[in-house]
Image (cartoon, grey):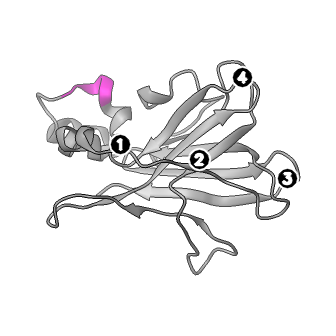
Amino acid sequence: MPAHLAGWLGPLDWVEDAPSITGDLICPCGGRAFELLHPGKTHRPGRLPEPIPCTVKIPGRPDEFNHWLAIDVVCVGCWARAVVFDSMRHGYAMFLAADRWQRQVRPTLVPWACSGCGGRPHRGRVRFHFPERDDFLAEFAGRCGAERWADGFDYFEMRAECASCGHRVEPWAGFESD
């Protein structure tokens, strides 16, 4: 499991041949309903019936990739907050240019409202896909060991389900690291 979500994921399903994990978001207080926060911009991929969060352009040098996606959750029971995904600080990108990403200003995130009823509390289920362990360890030899392999995921995906009406958006968010 990625270290930044320790204590925030429910029972994990491990798929050996993928390799990936899937799990429900669960607050350390036991809550499963969250406000989902995203950068505020949406798009509608052709195969999906409704808009979903997408990347936003952030300041940076013209020769750098300056598009960002982040998903935070705020528990509606205890108001604890967790960063579920930040494309500039998590996954494979973290190992490629960690020093640059740490300097970035993180724009304000906005709450997601259900397209079915307008409600804000949602349940979330996340999936992290990992690169082949041996390839990852060879590429980052000397910078990290096997204990950091799960932090180097190359794909993130999240499903959202309204806690009020049950409307489900799958996938609700996703990002593939290059």
Q: Which residues are the magenta region?
A: 144-148
Which labelled disc corresponds to residue 91?
1
Residue type of the residue flagged with mark 1: Gly
* Residue 50 percent across, percent down from the top left: 68, 72
**Quadrant holding the C terminus:** bottom left
What whole-number distance in Å separates the C-alpha atoms at marks 1 and 3? 30 Å
Amino acid type indicated by mark 2:
Leu
Work out whether mark 1 precedes mark 3 in sequence or the reverse, and give the earlier one: 1
- Residue at (85, 60) in percent of width and height: 117
User: Is disc 4 surrounded by few (<14), some (14 to 19) or many (20+) residues within 10 Å?
Assistant: few
In space, the residues marked 2 and 1 are separated at their CA atoms by 19 Å
Q: Is residue 60 above or below residue 1?
A: below
Which label sits in the foreground, 1 or 4?
A: 4
- Indicate the position of residue 150 as horizontal and vertical percent values: 38, 33
Identify which residue, 97 or 79, lies in the foreground: 79
What SS does tag 4 mark?
A: loop
Q: Earlier in the sequence, mark 3 or mark 4?
A: 4
The crowd level at tag 2 (other Cα within 10 Å; few <14, some 14-19, many 20+) is many
Q: Which mark is residue 37?
A: 2
